[in-house]
Image (tube, coloured by chain):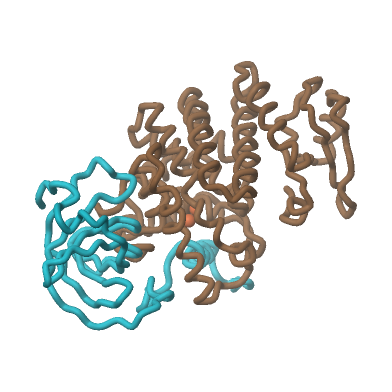
Chain colours: A brown, B cyan
């Protein structure tokens, strides 16, 4: 996975799982070997062959890179040749979807355009909901496919996928509802754009001033999106209330119980689940079972009982 | 949390991290007022108000109610309301001289059961608004 340095040099990581032999991606692929500078791996005129993909796999290379400027071409490739291709296995389609989400969001964030991000989120939310709902995908299949690093793009993608699975099991059966939940989840941390990366990735406890900046992200996200007529109240509350806790100990308002929207309660649980099951620069991921115990310990005080019970049932199957 | 105590169980570490990244530290006493430009004065009063729906919930009717004010400055006022308010939500208050002033909610914080405190700034009211109400509120 590329660190911020490669991204700042204009490269985006793409999962090799989304590359197929003989398909035309129409963009150059780059590779970074351990301890070496990034280099051209395959020019766009030469499609990858089975042997190439095998070799990458043997070397444990699960990502190659594209130029940031080619993000749109790669996204089109994923949508046209992977995502909607019924013959492609579900796990590859989920990987492709994750890639589309990450690449698309990178673009929108680079453009510093929350409206572009919201447009994308509603398209991607539909895709996520239809893939997860149609294929009746279980968490145990998805958990191992998703990445567990600490980048905001990875996080929102994971949270969105989890939200759909959880909402589905809580009884939201309409695809448009699930798509709406997925979109809200993709946008839930959009206010983090205003939090400097050095604060978000800081390996030490944030100072009081840094905390004050972090704590603003639900409000700034809500303020940026609240005038969009195509976003529902539930979606906006996923953005504004995902750090609220049932007992009022959360932020930004300290709202309690029924003053917290049901979708925000769903988002709160999977948000914490993903935060803890992802690695950070200074710690290993916490095993999913332990995170589940942790969520259950705070049931009724921080988290909604029914939501945690439903999520725990799925998590226990991950193994 | 750059160095985890090795004796900490993973779940304790989880709790610690969660506290850092998801949960709040104590609410700053002066939350939302860091950019205050004008001195504020204590102003305890009960005013008639029209609370308009928050952006994002346009289908909700405006509500007539009473709000308790806490303090006042040239830039805005803070008040208490029984329901949660949201940033950018607008409220018309009728001051003691009968004039209507429009407020925009900047922040809101729960104080206790059925009691939220909100910091608001004055925004421009359309001239006609002091002559006739913006909308016919539906009551509590
Ligand atoms: Fe957040
Ligand atoms: Fe989050």
Q: Residue furthest top?
A: A87
Query: Does residue A227 appear in the picture of this structure?
Result: yes
Q: Residue at x 61, y 28 (%)?
A: A93
Query: Above or below — where is A189 with respect to B105?
Result: above
Report the number of discs.
0
Question: Residue B11's x, y, as percent?
Answer: 50, 62
Question: Residue A198's x, y, as percent?
Answer: 64, 66
Task: Determine the image quadrant of residue A241.
Answer: bottom left
Q: Residue furthest left?
A: B139
Query: Above or below — where is B74 with respect to A316?
Result: below
Q: Residue at x 26, y 59 (%)?
A: B125
Question: Residue B31's x, y, as percent?
Answer: 38, 73
Question: Residue B111's x, y, as percent?
Answer: 24, 70
- Nearer to us in this view, A285 or A168: A168
Task: Determine the image quadrant of residue A73.
Answer: top right
- Relative placement, left or right, of A133 versus A36 is left
- Relative placement, left or right, of A278 versus B77 is right
Task: Determine the image quadrant of residue B8.
Answer: bottom right
Query: Does residue B6 appear in the picture of this structure?
Result: no
Q: Residue at x 13, y 47 (%)?
A: B136
- Nearer to us in this view, A66 or A133: A66
- Relative placement, left or right, of B119 versus B65 is right
Q: Residue at x 56, y 47 (%)?
A: A113
In the rendered view of the protein, which quadrant contains the C terminus of chain A?
top right
């Amino acid at each position: 996975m590329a660190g911020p340095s490669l991204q700042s040099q204009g490269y985006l990581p793409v999962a090799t799982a989304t590359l197929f032999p003989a398909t035309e991606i129409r963009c150059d692929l780059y590779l970074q070997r351990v301890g070496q500078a990034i280099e051209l791996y395959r020019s766009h005129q030469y499609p990858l062959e089975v042997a190439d993909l095998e070799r990458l796999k043997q070397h444990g290379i699960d990502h190659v890179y594209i130029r940031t400027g080619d993000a749109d071409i790669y996204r089109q490739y994923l949508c046209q040749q992977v995502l909607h291709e019924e013959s492609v296995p579900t796990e590859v389609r989920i990987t492709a979807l994750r890639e589309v989400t990450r690449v698309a969001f990178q673009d929108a964030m680079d453009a510093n355009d929350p409206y572009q991000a919201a447009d994308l989120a509603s398209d991607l939310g539909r895709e996520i909901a239809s893939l997860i709902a149609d294929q009746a995908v279980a968490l145990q299949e998805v958990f191992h496919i998703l990445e567990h690093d600490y980048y905001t793009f990875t996080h929102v993608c994971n949270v969105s996928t989890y939200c759909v699975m959880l909402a589905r099991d809580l009884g939201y059966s309409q695809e448009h509802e699930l798509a709406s939940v997925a979109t809200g989840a993709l946008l839930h941390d959009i206010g983090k754009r205003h939090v400097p990366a050095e604060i978000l990735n800081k390996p030490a406890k944030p100072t009081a001033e840094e905390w004050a900046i972090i704590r603003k992200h639900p409000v700034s996200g809500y303020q940026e999106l609240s005038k969009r007529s195509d976003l529902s109240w539930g979606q906006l509350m996923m953005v504004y209330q995902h750090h609220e806790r049932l007992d009022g100990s959360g932020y930004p308002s300290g709202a309690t119980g029924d003053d917290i929207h049901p979708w925000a309660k769903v988002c709160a649980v999977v948000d914490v689940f993903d935060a803890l099951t992802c690695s950070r620069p200074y710690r290993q991921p916490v095993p999913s079972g332990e995170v589940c115990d942790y969520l259950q310990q705070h049931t009724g005080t921080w988290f909604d009982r029914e939501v945690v019970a439903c999520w725990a049932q799925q998590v226990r199957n991950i193994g | 949390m750059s160095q985890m105590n090795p004796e900490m169980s993973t779940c304790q570490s989880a709790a610690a991290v969660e506290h850092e990244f998801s949960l709040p530290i104590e609410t700053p006493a002066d939350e939302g007022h860091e950019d205050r430009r004008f001195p504020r004065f204590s102003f305890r009063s009960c005013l008639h108000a029209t609370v308009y729906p928050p952006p994002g919930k346009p289908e909700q009717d405006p509500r007539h109610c009473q709000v308790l004010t806490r303090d006042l400055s040239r830039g805005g006022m803070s008040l208490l309301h029984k329901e949660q308010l949201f940033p950018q939500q607008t409220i018309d208050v009728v001051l003691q001289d009968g004039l209507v002033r429009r407020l925009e909610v900047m922040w809101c914080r729960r104080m206790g059961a059925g009691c939220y405190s909100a910091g608001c700034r004055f925004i421009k009211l359309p001239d006609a608004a002091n002559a006739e109400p913006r909308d016919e509120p539906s009551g509590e």
